[in-house]
Image (cartoon, rainbow, N blue to C red):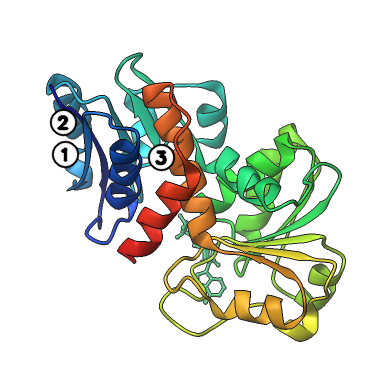
Amino acid sequence: MITMYGVIGDPIAHSLSPAMHNAAFKALGMDCYYAAFHVKGRYLHEAVNGARALGFGGLNVTVPHKEAVIRFVEADAAAREIGAANTIDFRTNKAYNTDAPGAIASLEDSGVKVKGRSVLVLGAGGAARAVTYGLLKAGATVTIANRTAQKAADLAAYMREYGEVFGTGMDNLREKVSISDIIVNTTTVGMGQDETLVTADMLSDRQTVLDLVYRPVETRLLREARLAGARAIDGITMLVRQGALSFEIWTGVKPPIDVMERGARDAL
Ligand code: ATR
């Protein structure tokens, strides 16, 4: 019998996760199918229980439900510390956060060492929480810069338990960029528009830029990074890695990353 998997979110229509996971299931000859489900907040708990009742193997949880779902699933220590889960495994009824390790894998698979590096995280929202946690656990020093400086300060204060982290506003961004080895954009700037917070003249060829935005794949920020000779890592790279980690949690099988990546890129 086919085993169902899925992603729940609101909105969800343009999710690349079905294409990515189904490509891996197909390549591995597994009798599994992954679908996207539009779930409103008021039905979140029922949707998770319903999927469990229907015998689903697991679920991905995406925006805006990653934080709320923590309240009624058994999350592992990292997901609890981040305050958000994106993966539920119904075999064990446990929940995990694969965004944090997915971000680290995006950098390390691209040949970028994280331990001991200075990282500038742009933004202090949900994505920044997971990324900052992952970076600190991997031994990086993190500066969180956010338009609303107080949110960066609050996030840094919360994350201090896990490593060396500072919170600031977006002022003097040029200087903050210049003293960083790695710059990660977790803001929505660049999503659907040709805008960027960091330009080529602020970057150099010894730096790495990771943009979590993947629509468009080639964001203005990544173009600026390449122009400066910096290493540019796109949002699909990260999306695929968090997805591959979910896949492995559910099935115990390491999926072919290249197959998942092609599935996602083809679906764009
Ligand atoms: P996510 O869950 O994807 O992290 P979010 O929690 O809504 O999304 O966070 C969005 C982030 O993008 C925030 O850090 C936000 O900054 P504020 O906290 O100041 O709102 C940032 N952001 C959105 N639009 C921005 C803009 N035009 N300039 C700078 N930062 C922006």
Q: Is mark 2 within 8 Å of ligand 1?
A: no
Q: Residue at x 26, y 24 (%)?
A: 57
How far across and down, in percent of the image, does residue 209 sit?
69, 65
Confirm whether residue 180 shows in the render.
Answer: yes
Name which quarter of the figure residue 75 lies in.
top left
Confirm whether residue 74 shows in the render.
Answer: no
Q: In terms of secondary structure, where does tag 1 sit? A: helix
Residue ID for mark 2: 46
Residue ID for mark 1: 43
Q: Give yes or no for contact between labels 1 and 2 (Cβ–Cβ under 8 Å).
A: yes
Q: Residue at x 56, y 60 (%)?
A: 186
Q: Is mark 3 within 8 Å of ligand 1?
A: no
Please give the count of numbered marks on the rendered protein: 3
Judge the density around disc 3: few (<14), some (14-19), many (≥20) Cα neighbours within 10 Å.
some
The amino acid type of the residue labelled 1 equals Tyr
The amino acid type of the residue labelled 3 equals Glu
Closer to us: 195 or 268: 268
Q: Residue at x 82, y 60 (%)?
A: 181
Residue ID for mark 3: 67
Disc 1/disc 3 C-alpha distance (Å): 15 Å
Say if 179 sits above or below 201 in the image: above
Judge the density around disc 1: few (<14), some (14-19), many (≥20) Cα neighbours within 10 Å.
few
